[in-house]
């Protein structure tokens, strides 16, 4: 079969249950997406045929509902925390590349956040302000951005733009 990186094949949408750890992680990351970018539809998992031997048969990416994804494929892991970190980082790449904006942003400092390597409780980390006494901090555990973000509830039912971009 002919495969070229310049003509990538169409992705296959991964069905629920194929990758339970990634599914669970994506549910948490989608909670963060829903409170920070409420106008967006949830992200999903898509698969492309592997190019290289260590890819295995498929490479799985975090994508928008129309199949768009950006960045590296998810690396296999046996732990829920590992899956959460992998999916959060992949989601971050896909969202920030598509929307041309940092995501997620710390509402205290206006800075794009990063995934901590905390093996027990992967979290969103912010570099903090430039003033002394305004240090780097962990903003929220991944999947718990709603604890620090007030969702705009009144308009939740109606979308201005129901179509994925
Ligand atoms: Zn901050």
Image (cartoon, helix red, strand yellow):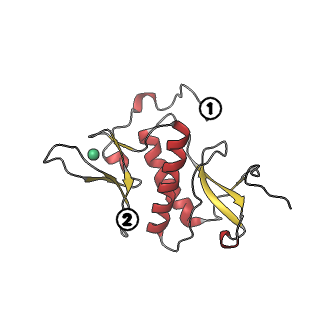
Q: Nearer the viewer, residue 135 or 118?
A: 135
Q: Nearer the viewer, residue 16 or 132?
A: 132
Quarter placement of the C terminus: top right
Q: Nearer the viewer, residue 129 or 42?
A: 129
- Image position of 162 with respect to 41: above or below: above
At 70% across and 73% down in the image, what residue appears? 53
Q: Could you tell me which secondary element the residue under label 1 belongs to?
A: loop
- Image position of 129 with respect to 165: above or below: below
Image location (x, y in percent) of residue 140: 32, 52
Image location (x, y in percent) of residue 148: 30, 45
Q: Which mark is residue 163?
A: 1
The residue under label 2 is 117
At 61% across and 35% down in the image, what residue appears? 164
Q: Residue furthest left?
A: 133
Q: Residues within 10 Å of mark 2 (few under 14, many from 20)?
A: some
Q: Nearer the viewer, mark 1 or mark 2?
A: 2
Q: Nearer the viewer, residue 123 or 158?
A: 123
At 39% across and 32% down in the image, what residue appears? 152
Quarter placement of the N terminus: bottom right
Side (left or right) of 66 relative to 134: right
At 36% across and 60% down in the image, what residue appears? 116
């Amino acid at each position: 079969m002919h495969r070229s990186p310049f003509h990538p094949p169409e992705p296959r949408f991964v069905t629920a249950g194929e990758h339970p750890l990634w599914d669970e992680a994506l549910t948490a990351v989608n909670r963060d997406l829903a409170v920070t970018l409420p106008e967006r539809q949830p992200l999903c998992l898509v698969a492309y045929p592997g190019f290289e031997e260590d890819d295995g048969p498929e490479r799985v990416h975090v994508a928008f509902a129309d199949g768009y994804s950006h960045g590296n494929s998810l690396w296999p892991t046996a732990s829920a925390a590992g899956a959460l970190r992998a999916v959060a980082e992949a989601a971050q790449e896909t969202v920030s590349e598509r929307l041309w904006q940092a995501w997620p942003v710390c509402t205290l400092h206006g800075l794009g956040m990063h995934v901590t390597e905390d093996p027990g409780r992967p979290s969103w980390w912010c570099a903090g302000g430039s003033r002394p006494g305004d240090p780097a901090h962990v903003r929220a555990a991944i999947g718990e951005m709603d604890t620090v973000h007030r969702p705009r509830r009144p308009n939740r039912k109606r979308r201005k733009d129901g179509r994925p971009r």
